[in-house]
Amino acid sequence: MRNFVCLLALSLTPAMLFAQSPERFRVYLGTYSGKLSQGIYQCELNLKNGSLSRPELAAETKDPSFVAFHPNKKFLYAVNEGQASVSAFAIDAKTGKLTYLNSQPSQGGAPCHLVVDATGKNVLAANYSGGSCICIPIEPDGKLAKASSFQQHVGKRKHGHSIHVDKANKFAVCADLGLDKIIVYRFDPEKGTLAANDPPAFNTPKGAGPRHFAWHPNHQFAYINGESNMTVIVCAYDAEKGAFTQKQVLSTLPKTEKRKGGSTAEVVVHPSGKFVYVSNRDPYNSIAIFSCNPKTGMLKAVGHESRNVKTPRNFAIEPTGQYMLIANQSSNSVMSLRINQKTGALTPTGSVIEVGSPVCVRFMPLSK
């Protein structure tokens, strides 16, 4: 009976799995502060047509360039990149407004990415300047306690750019762009500690500049976007050892394109595991689309989407897998695209909202 249930779950599409899900998602948008932005914004995504509502300021805060939810969806955490801190907010379930709780120093410069572990007991963040990562315990009321663990990366050019925890909540992996490494730590969620793993790191190709990282839904594979060399790196993952093995490296540009500058920003796996996407920033301004073999994890380039895309910093796919939202940093906009469930192709819905310097997109279900 258990095997039957597992096979049934694997056979369902994201839309089928979310058949009883809300018809709308609340969307939180992290930004860089400026004339057009004062903090974290919120809007709503309508799953019937992919339309976005007018954005509203959810909380005034400085440079909240990345945000993450607590598993209970009662709290939101943000890095304040310019202030070298991590902040906690309580979420009003009815209005979506955020109430500031407190903040803690990130103990490193320009924190640029964070996650909350599966137990909801810790926030883990990556510091770009100086290259380091930190673990900060979460109190029962959602506030942040003093840091419980700090790890300084070692090398001449250190830039921590993202951090993630594996499905078992056993290992934390931090992409260091400057060192060309995915640094792996043994993670203890009860103690809130990070300790060097054996092996301590996965070495990406020299000059790749690993920036962001995404797990395949089966957690047997991982995908890394090389910011500096504009590639996507495919890895197999050994969940027992916390070790990665390189399987494939592909360019995120068309074969006919002769590269002139440029960089990638984000990598995202579709909830179905069938597609992987990477954002190409100026001057290419596109989303690279790859089909994925779920048995091997290997990718095949199948196209690019560039209509109205301008400096696509961060983008995300809502949990049902029907729509992608792209944060166009330099054009101060967030756009909605429909995803073809058979091919992975993207089609703009025509819904675009104005948000100053958007750099992070995160979804929260809303009741029907």
Image (cartoon, helix red, strand yellow):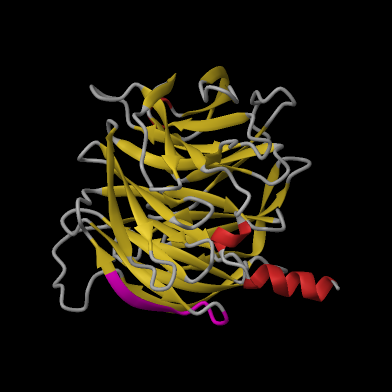
Q: Quadrant of residue 289?
A: bottom left
Q: Residue at x 36, y 28 (%)?
A: 55
- Residue 139 visible in the displayed image: yes
Q: Residue at x 67, y 58 (%)?
A: 167
Q: Position of residue 246 (x, y in %)?
A: 49, 76
Q: Position of residue 50 (x, y in %)?
A: 38, 47
Q: Is residue 149 above or below residue 13?
A: above
- Residue 110 visible in the displayed image: no
Say if the magenta span includes residue 260.
no
Question: What span is colored magenta in the figure?
Answer: 295-303
Image quadrant where one finds the C terminus: top right
Q: Is residue 236 above or below residue 181?
A: below
Instruction: Return the residue found at the far right.
Output: 1
Q: Quadrant of residue 352?
A: top left
Relative to the observer, which residue lies in front, 48 or 5?
48
Q: Position of residue 10 (x, y in %)?
A: 65, 71
Relative to the observer, which residue lies in front, 315 or 62?
315
Relative to the observer, which residue lies in front, 154 or 47?
47
Q: Is residue 282 above or below residue 363?
A: below
57 left or right of 216?
left
**How many numbered dots are placed on residues in this image?**
0
Q: Position of residue 307 (x, y in %)?
A: 20, 56
Relative to the observer, which residue lies in front, 203 or 43?
43
Image quadrant where one finds the N terminus: bottom right
Q: Is residue 152 above or below residue 32?
A: below
Q: Residue at x 50, y 60 (%)?
A: 214
